[in-house]
Each structure stands twice: as C-alpha cells, then as structure tokens.
Image (cartoon, grey):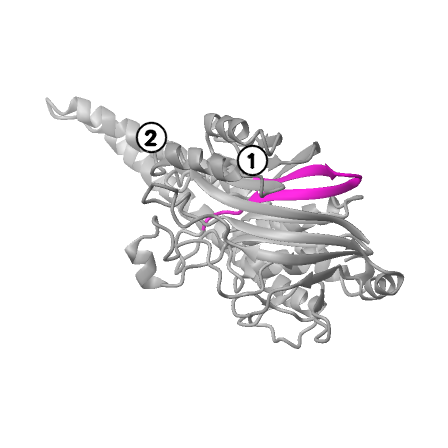
Amino acid sequence: MLLLELNILTLNIWGIPYVSSDRGLRIEAICKELSRGKYDIVSLQEVWSQLDSEQLQKGTASTLPYAHHFHSGVMGAGLLVLSKYPILGTLFHAWSVNGYFHRIQHADWFGGKGVGLCRILIGDQMVHLYNAHLHAEYDNDNDEYKTHRVIQAFDTAQFIEATRGNSVLQILAGDLNTQPQDISYKVLLYTSKMLDSCDSDVFRTNECERNSYTSAKSLSKNPRGIRIDHIFVRGADHINAEILEYSLPFPERVPGQKFSFSDHEAVLAKIKLTRASSDEASTTVDEELPSITQQQGGSGDAPCNLEANPSNGSINGPAVDENASCSAAMSQPAARTAALHEALALCDASLLQLNTDRILYYSAATFLFVLLILLVEFTAPIGMRTIFLLLKFIVFGVILFCIFMASIWNYMERNGVLQGKKSMEVMLQHAQKYEYFY
C-alpha cells in the first residue's frame, strides 16, 4: 500500500555574512531553483543571517509555504527547513560539546549548533525531518574536533531514537562533516539504525571538481572531492522506505554566472513509502531493523549492505562502508559495538588531554602572576610608562584567560565529553541483552 512519495533536498548554502563569496546573488539563485516545485522538503544549513532566512522563505513561499528557522547560540543555529506541507511542531536539541569559544577563526561554538526536528504532516502521515550541521573538520592530519563530532553524532542518533514517536518516516538531512569511512559516520548510522540514501561512490558534495569554489589546493590533495552532505532515512515499524533516486540536482553553475550555488553541492533523495505486508512486517519484527530498499547500484565510499537480500535488493538496517575497519561479514550489532568502542577511546583521550591542559593553564597563570608582580615593582623608564602600563594590562588579561580555561571552561568541556561517554557506555552495557529496544 503506497503511503507517500517525497523529494528531499539538503544544501549547505555557505551563507556567512561578509565572508562567503557572491552570497547575495547565490541566495537569489537558490530561491529561484527551490521555487521550481520539484522539492517537497528542503533542509538548509549555514543560514547565518536573519535577512537571508527571510529572503529564502519569501522567495520560495509559492511552492514551499511552510518554514522554520532554528535559533541558538550567538549567531543562530544556521538551520532552516522549508516544506510544501504543514510543520506542526519543532524541537531543537543543542549538543553538549561544540568547539572552542577562543577559536574565533573557526566560529562553530558561536553558532550554538545542534539538531533541529520538524514534525511535518503529509496527508494523514507524520514525517520527522531532522536538520543538523556537525562540527567542521579543519585539519585532517590533526583533527582536534574529532571527539566533539563523534559525540554530536551519537547525541543526534539518540535524539532521533527518542523522538521517533508516531512518525512513519525519519529523515536526517544535513551537512554532517563526516565521510563514510569516518568514525562519526559509523557511530551515527549504527546507533540510529538509519540508512544512507546514497549507495554509490560516484557522488561528491564538497571540494569536488564541478564546484567553482573548490580551491586548487583541495583538488591537488583529493581530486575526487569528499561526500559529507547526507540524507539518512529510517521507516517506522511495518513501513518500507524505498530510495527511488539519489542525485545532485542543481546545475554546476548559477545560470548566467561563472560560480556555483554554494561551496557544497545540493543533494536530492526521492523516497517512496509503503506499508509492509503481513509477511514482511513479521520479518521486520523478528530482525528488529527498519526495512529499506535502494534502487541504485554501486559501492565504494557508500556503505556495504550487511543485511541485504541479494534476491530482491531489500536492505534491513544501516550499512557499513566497504573500506571501514569492520568486515562485510560483521553483523550490525557487532559493527555498532566496534564503533562505540572506538568512540569511547577518543573520549578517554580527550579527557586525558583536558587534565593536561588544566595543569598547563594553571602553570602559565602562575608564571604570569609572578611576572606581573615583577612588573608592578619595576619602575618604568621615563617615556616607557604607557607601554609598561599596557603590558601590565595584557599580562593581567592573559592570567584571567588562563584561569578561566583551567577552571570554568575545562569543567564545561570535561562534563560535555563525560556526558557523551557515559551515554555510549550505557548502550554498550545493555545493547546485547536488550537488543529488542536498540
């Protein structure tokens, strides 16, 4: 029995005021593209300006009359959902860890990031759309935010599980800043039992050759680009969700211009929802996994289908990347356990580093305090008093910063990591015995 068909689109619009190139022209072009009536639900990230949000809502009101902009942090969450169907309810969940406030050049902390939920009524069926933008990876060789991103991924999966309610379909669509081989990707999929709508290694959504904003340095490092923008899906019990199409629907360039719509590519997933037959329903209950079917072929950086039935292409539950550390023969619960153990190791390493950082900051504060006393006692030469006074203020300010980082910030960060770690440990402790509930 056919319940509904949906065209879901996600796009990071790269809407950073005063920073993003060609922002005004690109947002105008995005409005025109979204107004073509091809999309049912649109999930946008990096909508950092309220004016941009209003322009996107007004510019698409003819085809996507319902909208919700999530607000959080200093700059706002940057998440906007546009829908052809009524949005009956919304909820925003901020993550316990989200970067560092003193890394102003990265600015993720000021965004107050988290995962936003829109409860959308389509006919008489409730669909949950989750919009998220995980912390960016700024240095692949020395990724200091890896633990943050893993905890955000696990937190998002738990939030989805806790809020599924009576929805027939859950969709996570956003810039997740994680590739299929990454631990964050595996933790998110395995603990949420969702499925990546892409099963081909052909697609790349960021730093790819087709995008005008991709730098020569990025192309020389990785000519194919990376896939970090995702649409994950999970049907309710006794519901089959079939992926009819996965594509990058936007043109390579804004019509009449030499630049792309964003530094990310838009991603489209066409989903068909049907009610399972009695036989299929009983099978789903026995396996305790959502039933998903994909139409495309391919492998590579998309997950391998662990529970696939080769005779009909039916996939039950989340999948695992062929290049990941776990083997293709590993069961979904075992893959989840392996991913959680790896994530816990990252948390332990971060907690150890936090202890080291606390000692270093306190030591630096002590050394600077002694230096400040010496400066106070020292009589400045004539003509240098202003400079010496300024130096004292600077040293005093750095002392306050070190004390803040060693105390208040260190404990905030420690508690955030501990919260994620303890939640993962709870799942590991009980998942095997109570697999029915996981």
Give the residue displayed 57% in from the left and 62% down from the top: 345
Magenta stretch mostly in which secondary structure? strand
| Residue 262: quadrant of the picture | top left
The quadrant where residue 196 appears: bottom right
Number of residues whose C-alpha sits closer than 10 Å to that of mark 2, classed few (under 14), some (14–19) or many (20 or more)? some
Q: Position of residue 315 (x, y in %)?
A: 70, 66
- Residue 379 visible somewhere in the drawing: no
Circle on res. 396? 2
Q: In the image shown, does 373 or 434 lie closer to the viewer? A: 434
As rendered, which of 350 and 54 lies closer to the eye? 54
Residue position marked by numbered label 1 in the rendering: 80
Q: Is residue 121 above or below residue 387?
A: below
Is residue 128 covered in magenta?
A: yes
From the viewer's perspective, tell me whether residue 371 is left or right of residue 343: left
Please say if 66 is above or below 337.
Answer: above
Q: Position of residue 427 (x, y in %)?
A: 72, 57
